[in-house]
Amino acid sequence: MSASETTAGRGSRGESLEPVVSFVVPARNETEYIRGTLSSIVGLDTAYAYEVIVVDGGSTDGTAAIAREYDVTVVSDGGSGIGPARDLGADYATGDWLAFVDADTRVRANYLTAMLGYVETEGVAGASSACRITGPYRAKLMEATINHIFPRLELPILPGFNCFVRRDAYRDVGGFPNVPNEDTAFSRRLARSYDTGYCARVLAESSGRRIADAGLTGTLWHYGRLDVARIRAGSRG
């Protein structure tokens, strides 16, 4: 494993600091979205130091080249899957907190400060935030499920496109497993050992492209089928 670029931690005033938070962005053939994602992260309005790690999953387009335009670390996992890609990014992380953000997700300028304030005030080891899913109107049902159902589950689901977790807790529960619906499996493992929650006062926006491509029924079937496959794979989720 080798990084093609390395960054120092960044703060709102640009000084070189040890990062408090490491953003991990898995990406495979994401030229349409990754520029917006990285622009939103490097443009955060915060005094906290942070770093950004892009894990390229064997892209055959210009995804890695676009990522290298930014002050980020770029590593490659050869396309072994979303769970291993997130886990590889965590291996390179040096921050006390890991912020997993997908390559089609944008965060608001106050995301980092709000999330750190929330987890410290609430004493939780993992969290997500309010989300907005772009795309067709039916994407709003998925958005409502994430915003209003996931947080109320006995073991809350922290969606992989917007997951904020303490690094030692992440490692303690084994990280993201290499199974379908890896974020559900990870969230349930984490919630069995640590308190988790949702920060409603900050927003992350993610693409509803799968809903646009497959329709709402197809999307729910996709995730339902993955959850069955995950259970059959022997996950404790």
Image (cartoon, rainbow, N blue to C red):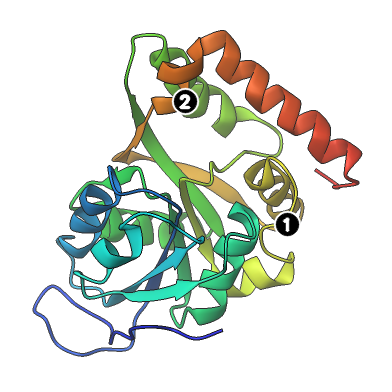
Q: Residues within 10 Å of mark 1 (few under 14, many from 20)?
A: many
User: Helix or strand or loop: what does disc 1 sit on?
Assistant: loop
Figure quadrant of the C terminus = top right
State how far apart marks 2 and 1 are (Cα). 22 Å
Residue flagged by tag 1: what amino acid is it? Pro
Rendered view: 211 above or below 24: above
- Mark number, residue 177: 1
Instruction: Give me the residue at 71% from left, 34% from top.
Output: 154
Q: Is residue 178 above or below residue 172?
A: above
Hey, which residue is sitting farthest front in the picture?
60
Q: Nearer the viewer, residue 117 or 16?
A: 16
Q: Disc 2 on helix, strand or loop? A: helix
Q: Position of 210 compared to 171: left or right?
A: left
- For the residues carrying marks 2 and 1, which lies nearer the camera in this image? 2
Marks 2 and 1 close (CB-CB < 8 Å): no
Pointer 2 residue: 210
Number of the label disc, if any, that sits on residue 77: none
Provide residue 234's location: percent of width, then percent of height.
91, 46
- At x 63%, y 38%, the residue is 156
Give x and y (percent) for residue 47. Answer: 18, 72
Is residue 146 visible to the viewer in this orientation of the structure?
A: yes
